Amino acid sequence: MVVTQVMYDKICLITGANAGIGFETARGIAKSGATVVLACRNRHRGESAVNEIRADSGNDKLYLMLCDLSSQADIRRMVAEFHSRFDRLHVLINNAAMYTPTRSLSADGLELQFASNYLSCFLLTHLLLDLLKTSAPARIVNLSTINHFDVSLDLDDLQSEQIYEPKVVHVRSKLAVILFTYELARRLQGTGVTANCLHPGVIATNLLGEVRNVPPEQRFTEVMGGDPLEAGARTPVFLATSAEVEGVSGKYFDDCKAVPSSSETYDEEKTISLWTISEKLTGMNPISG
């Protein structure tokens, strides 16, 4: 993986960094010399990831912070911890995602995939915005999926109470990430903070195995399919480190290139409506724009 910009004086926070694309992204950015904070739910897996990346990259500036991203209280707790340990943040990568075959609720009473895959991204970003602004130039990188072309967002049923089809619910949560990214980029104009989103590719992760209903013993084989994890990290690392995208904001990337997303993602009325709903669900104050 090629990193095009030295990051020795930069601090990067990556969610879901103990496995899959998040782990490979953390590894790639660590090799650039940046300080990398891995936000993970499981302490053992997080510590193992930190130790492996440290040994592979030779970078000692690796830190673990625990967080259950389905819990708004835990997100707020982690952000308070981050503020107590760091006074800057140059790159925030919202990578974490989960898949649940049956409808479940978060600790906040919200549908679990929507809460974990989208609202966590909305809340965490908002809570760190002031720090990102004071650290500018800074970047926000949000992971989505190319499958967003196949679904539409129903603002009247964001909690999937009427129909719960797990694959559709998962992709809708990633569609919401794109709408959020575009509106965020618009509101951040002139601040020195950019926001972009991306499709990492169809990558052989445990998440892909869950979505495709592949038994654990057959994952990471030809049965499951998907490209190597390293390929999935290529675009996130590019957006986090490359001088080529300095100042670029409000774009959707695939294979390190800005490409059009679905027509729905450019629906400004829907984007603003989703934003307003998300503010209410997270208790966040509006960002002017």
Image (spheres, rainbow, N blue to C red):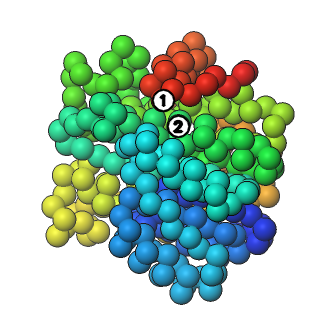
User: Mark 2 = which residue?
Assistant: 123
**Quadrant location of the C terminus in the rendered image:** top right
Residue 177 is situated, as x and y percent measured from the top left of the image, at 50, 36
Residue 135 is situated, as x and y percent measured from the top left of the image, at 79, 51
Secondary structure state at the residue bearing disc 1: helix
Say what amino acid the circle numbered 1 marks. Answer: Thr
User: Mark 1 = which residue?
Assistant: 282
Q: Eyeballing the image, is 242 above or below 287?
A: below
**Quadrant location of the N terminus in the rendered image:** bottom right
Q: Which residue is depicted at the point 59% across and 73% down?
A: 62
Side of 208 where 283 appears, left or right: right
Say what amino acid the circle numbered 2 marks. Answer: Leu
Residue 82 is situated, as x and y percent measured from the top left of the image, at 60, 56
Please state which of residues 142 and 115 is positioned toward the viewer in this rendering.
Answer: 115
Q: CA distance from mark 1 to mark 2?
A: 6 Å
Side of 266 where 89 appears, left or right: right
Query: Within 10 Å of the Cα at label 2, are there few (<14), some (14-19), or many (20+) other Cα atoms?
Result: many
Secondary structure state at the residue bearing disc 2: helix
